[in-house]
Image (cartoon, rainbow, N blue to C red):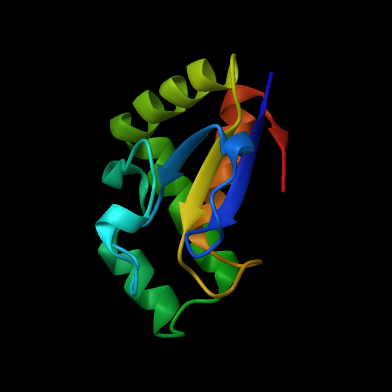
Amino acid sequence: MHEIRLKRVYEVPSPDDGVRVLVDRLWPRGIRKADLPYDAWPKEITPSPELRKLYHRGEMPFAGFREGYAEELEASEGTAAFAERCRKWLETQDVTLLYAAKNQQENHAQVLAAWLRQKSGAEGGA
């Protein structure tokens, strides 16, 4: 089994990224679409706009956001289907989740990666 990795969209792509999945609902600022190599952009796996806005406005601590987003992930058929796609990719290559957030420790991609690792049995990566 390969790894689920995290990488900011502003970092240079690497041949060992494997499948590159953009996990932001909105297109990242300052990047032209032609300049960002990615294999999938499944918007159904992103946090709801309401949850995202509460967190970004500072009206919800990260722990509350993490819990709310995990609940959304569990309740969505779209995320279950994506987890299965991810599990299949991981049989042959790494999966790199691409995100634009400045905070690299507390963001939705961290929550999604942990959830996908639990669902797929994958290891964590850089």
Instruction: State whether residue 107 is above or below residue 122.
Output: below
Q: Is residue 36 above or below residue 1?
A: below
- Tally the marks: 0
The residue most toward the bottom is 58
Residue 59 image position (x, y, % from top left): 43, 83
Q: Is 3 drawn above or below residue 36 in the view shown? A: above
Closest to the observer: 115 or 43?
43
The image quadrant of residue 113 is top right
Locate residue 37, reporting x and y percent: 39, 46
Q: Residue at x 38, y 43 (%)?
A: 38
Where is residue 23 shown, x and y percent of the image? 40, 50
Q: Residue at x 28, y 62 (%)?
A: 27
Q: Which image quadrant is residue 118 in?
A: top right
- In the picture provided, is 46 more to the left or to the right than 95? left
Q: Name the side, left or right, on which 68 lies relative to 79.
A: right
Which image quadrant: the N terminus? top right
Q: Which sits in the foreground, 38 or 101?
A: 38
Q: On the rendered structure, is 109 left or right of 39?
A: right
- Residue 117 percent across, percent down from the top left: 63, 33
Say which residue appears at 28% left-offset and 43% top-offset: 44
Q: Nearer the viewer, residue 35 or 78?
A: 35
Quadrant of the rendered image containing residue 33: bottom left
